[in-house]
Image (cartoon, helix red, strand yellow):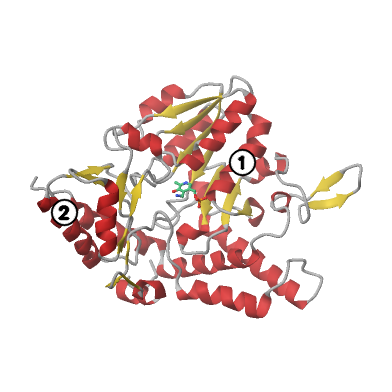
Amino acid sequence: SGHPPFDVNAVRRDFPILQERVNGKQLIWFDNAATTHKPQAVIDRLAYFYAHENSNIHRAAHELAARATDAYEGARKKVAKFIGASSVEEVIFVRGATEAINLVAKTWGVQNVGAGDEIVVSNLEHHANIVPWQQLAAQVGAKIRVIPVDDSGQILLEEYRKLLNDRTKLVAITQVSNALGTITPVREIVALAHSVGAKALVDGAQSVSHMRVDVQALDADFFVFSGHKVFAPTGIGVVYGKRDILEKMQPWQGGGNMIADVTFERTIYQPPPNRFEAGTGNIADAVGLGAAIDYVERIGLENIARYEHDLLAYATHALKPVPGVRLIGTAADKASVLSFVLAGYRTEEVGEALNREGIAVRSGHHCAQPILRRFGLEATVRPSLAFYNTCAEVDALVSVVRRLSSNRAH
Ligand code: PMP
């Protein structure tokens, strides 16, 4: 692939927090689906911005304004290339995936979904890809339809096909489930949506850090993600939208930056993406996102995907035979996430036992209650892997789970 071979120990040295001690132990971070850590390159880029470039972004005003504008627009260019957008005008900066989906619901949604229309989501969705569509449906009198999953946690494409009809206006689907790790067949899902004239929004919050994404190959109409889950700061995220769709969309928030001309009688808006970026944006953290993208591109998404695939297989193989462990989400195509329950223990108890050993996992509903309830559960323990995790860390996790298991003599 043109990249040097992947060296996990070299990569780990790029992340200062991995040296942190927690409860007397070296931190083991298995909560990557919630948020990822930041390489020194990102931390340094933020410091450099504030030390040398900080300004609001009106290019012409003065030297620092030009530097800040170049840095911010440079980050937009990196994002466009990272996800395969055809132009920078298709990349809107927002706070995160949640704000991204709300932007689409409150602009495109209100303009294009009406009474009796249908919005299709999957059983796997994060609440961020459910609630905004419910709110829209309630506002305009539309209906939500749900694609079911099989017992492995994979989308049932045949059932999906049956849900589609000429009232379907939008299909909103995650590329990777944050609760189970399922990689969904988004390309087919998008193509089927298009076959009935619907648009498709792909939630990439859990995909962009684990695999190469190409929005044009997916033919997604909208694609959203959060910076903080791809080694960038919090408070910055992206809406990608196809240019012709964005050009027809009304703005969401009004204010500075998004206007071409204002009188008391009327406002003429900027073209996309500025039309959707009212007010002063999160300039520094957008620049930080650009640095995070440079960092992962240097390692290579293909290297990351290959390494994580092997690590997830290793972890699955180690955890599955532990007596009392029930793995939730066993689809053939998965990324990063292991979700499980342990007989005889509440999920919080497992999380606490791991935390005592310095191991961070999420235990709870993962903002995806419908999919856990599909499996008869309210919560799971969820270790989620990134490319800086190791087999030795997996062994440490499994040994805690084994000890808990043997205390209950399954
Ligand atoms: N979608 C998915 C699949 C997610 O995992 C998350 C974050 N857990 C979100 C959307 C929302 O992202 P954020 O909280 O960063 O807005």
Q: Are marks 2 and 1 in contact (CB under 8 Å)?
A: no
The amino acid type of the residue labelled 1 equals Val
Q: Pick whichever, 254 or 260, lies toward us.
A: 254
Image quarter hosting the N terminus:
bottom left
Q: CA distance from mark 2 to mark 1?
A: 45 Å
Q: Looking at this view, is 19 or 247 the one in front?
A: 19
Q: Is residue 379 left or right of residue 52?
A: left
- Name the residue nearer the viewer: 344 or 236: 344
When the figure is inspected, residue 355 is found, relative to residue 224, above or below; the finding is: below
Residue 189 in picture, x, y percent from top left:
44, 35
Kindly identify the residue that appears in the image at 26 percent across and 59 percent down: 354
Comes first in the chain, label 2 or label 1: 1
Give the image quarter of residue 135.
top right
Q: Residue furthest left?
A: 409
Q: Which mark is residue 404?
A: 2
Residue 103 is left or right of residue 294, and the answer is right
Q: Which mark is residue 38?
A: none
Question: For the residue marked with disc 2, what is the amino acid?
Answer: Leu
Q: Residue furthest top?
A: 116
The residue at 65%/30% (across/down) is 112
Residue 310 seen in the current view: no
Point out the frontmost of discs 2 and 1.
Answer: 2
Element marked by disc 1: helix
Above or below: residue 147 compared with residue 71:
above
Quadrant placement of the C terminus: top left
Q: Is residue 20 left or right of residue 278?
A: left
Residue at left 68%, top 32%? 111
Q: Position of residue 10 (x, y in %)?
A: 34, 76
To which residue does mark 1 refer?
104
* Residue density around tag 1, few if under 14, some if 14–19, many if 20 or more, within 10 Å: many
- Asked which secondary structure carries label 2, the reply is helix
